[in-house]
Amino acid sequence: MRDIATAPVISAQNLNLTFQTGDGPVHALKDVNLDIAKGEFVSFIGPSGCGKTTFLRVIADLEQPTSGTISVNGLSSEAARKARAYGYVFQAAGLYPWRTIAGNIKLPLEIMGYSRADQDSRVKKVLELVELSGFARKFPWQLSGGMQQRASIARALAFDADILLMDEPFGALDEIVRDRLNEQLLELWARTEKTIAFVTHSIPEAVYLSTKIVVMSPRPGRISDVIDSPLPRERPLDIRDTPEFIEIAHRVREGLRAGHLDD
């Protein structure tokens, strides 16, 4: 039996998921085994359709595995969802245009039954975390795309779950904005010490952000490599020019290439 103090926050064992479609079965995940420890920043990278988002959705109890097990904080994914163990940030910000930024952030708190005073306090706190203080009364259409994504992250942080699931949140943004949000996300992670599972298609983004990089193969989605990063937790953007960074990026690229060759 695992010691509670060292037990992984997220653990997948022999996980498989097959979708039944009119054109036959689609094998989305195959024999996935992975442990994510408390406080890790884990990125998932692989070609489109390799099961990255599907795996995140399994963690969140939005998809059910065909076989194998998934546990979150020692609970089933369903029990973890009901215990509000995680916040989820989608590819699009998904903000309601008729609600202010504060109103969007309050929505899950309203559903969960938090008091008005607690809602206001939490909104103020998370807006400060994502550097959007002063924008509470703005509407989404008054904010840039990057600011909208930061508001979406604030909404996911509002009820202070220990786990943050992020499905390619910066993929549609230009490189300059993406770099800045990467920096801000690392700063936020350092301050909150949350466990983050992050889906991306960008090798530099995966290497820059992560303590662990999970490389996935084309469908059926398998883990072809797991890379523990030797980079320090504090990372200026120019770390991307160092030999250590370039070496990790090369290994990720080789893992992606190997996954294609094995397909």
Image (cartoon, rainbow, N blue to C red):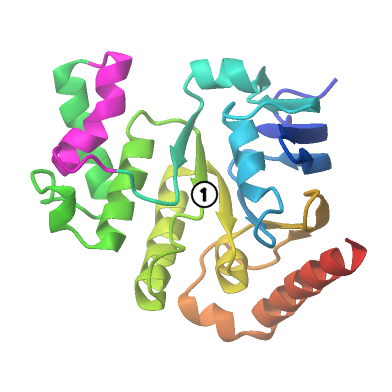
Question: Which residue is at the front of the view, 63 or 76?
Answer: 63
Left-right relation of 142 to 247? left
Question: Dot 1: what SS?
Answer: strand
Left-right relation of 105 to 28? left
Amino acid found under the numbered disc labelled 1: Asp
Residue that appears at 77% across and 35% down:
18
Residue 35 vertical placement versus 211 (above, below) = above
Residue that appears at 38% across and 64% down:
181
Residue furthest front as drawn: 22
Give neighbour class at mark 1: few <14, some 14-19, many 20+ (Cα, 10 Å).
many
Q: Position of residue 188 (x, y in %)?
A: 40, 52
Query: What residue is disc 1 on?
Result: 167
Q: Position of residue 163 (x, y in %)?
A: 52, 36
Q: Position of residue 100 (x, y in %)?
A: 13, 41
Q: Position of residue 77 (x, y in %)?
A: 63, 23
The N terminus lies in which quarter of the figure? top right
